[in-house]
Amino acid sequence: MPGGMTWLDVAAFFAFLVIWFGYGALFDGRFRRPNSINAKMLSIREAWMIRLLERDIRIADATLVGHSIRSVTFFASTTLILIAALVGVLGSAETVHSATENLSVLFGTTTQAMFELKVFLVVSIFVYAFFKFTWAIRQFNYFTAVIGGAPEAGSPALDRKFAHRMALMLSHGFWHFNAGVRAYYFALAALAWFIHPLMFIAATVLITLVLVRRQLFSRTARDIAEHAEIIAAESVAAKKASGEQTSGDSGGR
């Protein structure tokens, strides 16, 4: 095969892509697991939006969104630095490849073309992350306008659907932020390709298992799930109390 690539390299590369984007579809995409942290956070953000719409002063809410923007901005700027460094490695690939040949026990033996391909994969991952971060920043900025244009507390235009739409808009920004951070994890897996394709596959599976455990089985996941259940129970109780109050007022009249 061209560039010294083997069928094992090809299999490892495609397994990496399938696992990476498959994970994204299951935890941040259309097939999101309902018991994951990312899914539970949607209901918690909806509760936040309900409280936001009940408040006259929303400075604290805008501050919280601003904090998220600063966090994403930090990752975006860091990603640019990493991309620049990796492009520098590509520019001096011959020198760097010659240096790695002295570490054949760790990096194995590979052609310069394969070395450049592996570096290019890592560059591509960080470019993908950069676009995710910058799109998340833009969505958070759009959401600040949504906060500013939200109806006043007590407005007849307010209902739970309004809060749900606001929570969805905010969550889209967080899902793209998650995708960018997740790219960092899988970039670490891609580094294992420099050692051996089997190490590449093993690192990809290991990182995926770590992420799955955090999303479904970690202590944080259990605490967030319990918190979401409490919020849901309070919401049902509030609806029931409101319905009883409405019935009482009707009966009094």
Image (cartoon, rainbow, N blue to C red):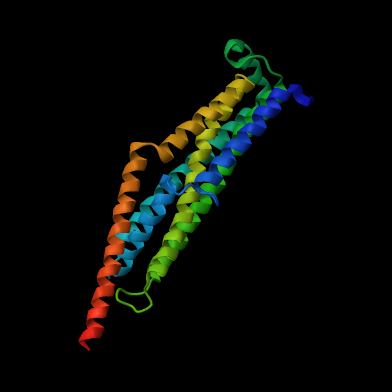
Camera-nearest residue between 65 and 210: 210
Q: Residue furthest right?
A: 1
Q: Quadrant of residue 22?
A: top right
Residue 233, x across and y down, in percent = 29, 58
Camera-nearest residue between 171 and 194: 171
Camera-nearest residue between 170 and 73: 170
Q: Residue furthest left?
A: 252
Camera-nearest residue between 189 and 29: 29
Q: Residue furthest front?
A: 251
Residue 213, x across and y down, in percent = 43, 35
Q: Is residue 65 above or below residue 78?
A: below
Residue 58, x across and y down, in percent = 30, 65
Q: Is residue 13 above or below residue 157?
A: above
- In the displayed structure image, the side of residue 49 where residue 101 appears, left or right: right
Q: Residue at 38% of width from left, 60% of height from top?
A: 46
Q: Residue at 51% of width from left, 33% of height from top?
A: 208
Residue 31, x across and y down, in percent = 54, 49
Q: Residue at 36% of width from left, 51% of height from top?
A: 67
